[in-house]
Amino acid sequence: MRKVVYVLDKDGMPLMPETCPGHVHFLLKNRIAKPVCSHPFTIQQIHETGKGMFRPLRGAIRVGRTDIGVAVIDEAGEILYAAHVTSRNREIPRLVEERAEHRHASRRGERQRRKRRAKKNGTTTEFSEGHKLPGYEDDVLEFKDIRNTEAKFNNRKESALDPITRQCVQTHCSVVRLVEKILPVTDWTIVCEDSLIQQMKSGCIPSEKRKFRKHGHLKGIKTQIATQQKGRCALCGKPLACAHHILPAKEGGSDCQENLVGLCQSCHAKVHTNRILLVREGDKKKVNGAVVVKKALPYIYDRFCKLFGKEHVFLCSEAAVATFRKIHGIEETCAMDAACAAAIRNHVDCIIPDGVEIFEIRQFRNHNRAIIQAQTERTYKLDGEIVAKNRRPRFSQKGPALSDWFAETEQREGREAALKKLSQLKVKPSQRRYNDLKRPLPGTLFRYQGKIYVLQAQRTKGRYFIPVGYPDMSIPSKDCEIIGFRSLVYI
């Protein structure tokens, strides 16, 4: 099995890698170089010995949502680096949904505080004919008690990409930067579909016009829905206010028109609190990897052109890679697809040494500043059985709230019986669990008994660490030495 050793100069800049074990041993034994990383094995020169001769190295990246392949070959077509990267892009929809829920709860708490303060000072106001928020002109919103501040959406910053696509673009750029820390790559090749290559070469998707968001990324689709529904709510016929996802985004629902229906504010709130059951025929398309990659590819190409120069970035079709792979009998993996694309660009045959090492890289979340780890709901029990949660239905609540349960009981058994049962309810208040802001996050590197591990999770309030790849192993945290944290970690 051939071992490639990556070399850095005195200033940390990458040099040509070493493939001769004897020369590497000579450098380390005579203290000309020192090891700086064990996986992948990298050495750094201690003294200035000259830059040496650089040969052109071709790199290629196989774009994907979850699985990304990257490889580097030399001028002879021999693989010097190959890696398979597992990204965390599929976590983004869930995190975006959680962030929205926390934001809604925070703003609702702020409004409630302002209402209590206004009631205490006697400054409440009644709006019998409705009241418009400053900057909101599409419809009249009814408010009570207080005069609200400017609508939040007036202060939003425009973003050309949705969070899922933006994270995908940033991940590919980070992967390339990680490779360029140990290898002096001269050119990069991106593997993509033939149709996208033609569109990007013809300029049909210029970067300055490729914007998915402008005052909300659903603006264009909402216009289509408003035209289709004649500007009326699909349930009650009132003027449209928002576009509702039939299949929720946290469950993989996309922003396609087939998965959206126009509703007013009142019906939208009732649908999310299960007071109205929305049933609509049609396809509910999910956000799959192909859709995300198709959106992200033009932006990845633009970002690569800005980083390395347009003359050093090339495109290679998936069909050409498949044909090359079939002719040379190469297995179909993300890393090997990238190596084939680099060989096609270099006009050489891809040489795979015996036992070539394909690195496994996993992406972890950079930060998690959440103070609250989890919060339980207020629970109401009758004769030991849970009958309701929360006094009023929260956003996207499943199951009845106390107000809904009381209304149903009153309608079924009468008001006196409902009040009697209400007095017999046992209440379990809401509780919160808080995060330790100094806790080590997943992806943290730690040393235990001379071996370096990557943190996967913690047990027993952080007393034990669970390393990646060892789910049944619990290491006492007091015996571990924290080394550092990286977003992209070699496993």
Image (tube, grey):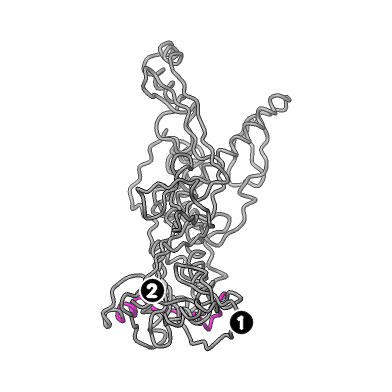
- Residue nearer the viewer, 356 or 270: 356
Q: Is residue 118 left or right of residue 352?
A: right
Name the residue tied to disc 2: 193
Tell me the kind of residue under disc 2: Glu
Q: Is residue 369 above or below residue 188?
A: above
Secondary structure under the numbered disc 2 in the rendered image: loop
Q: In the image, residue 195 lies at what x, y percent?
A: 39, 75
Q: Is residue 308 magenta?
A: yes
Q: Is residue 57 above or below residue 110?
A: below
Name the residue tied to disc 1: 48
Q: In the image, residue 134 lies at what x, y percent?
A: 67, 44
Disc 2 crowd, CA 10 A, few/some/many (<14, 14-19, 20+): some
Disc 1 crowd, CA 10 A, few/some/many (<14, 14-19, 20+): few
Q: In the image, residue 190 lies at what x, y percent?
A: 44, 75
Q: Residue at x 33, y 53 (%)?
A: 283
Q: Is residue 146 left or right of residue 445?
A: right
Q: Magenta stretch? A: 307-324
Q: Is residue 75 magenta?
A: no
Q: Quadrant of the C terminus?
A: bottom left
Secondary structure under the numbered disc 1 in the rendered image: loop
Q: Is residue 176 left or right of residue 159?
A: left
Q: Which numbered disc flags the more N-terminal residue, 2 or 1?
A: 1
Between label 2 and label 1, give the one nearer the viewer: 1
Q: State how many labels appear.
A: 2
In terms of image quadrants, where is residue 413?
A: top left
In terms of image quadrants, where is residue 80?
A: bottom left
Residue 261 can be seen in this image? no
Secondary structure predominantly adopted by residues drawn in magenta: helix
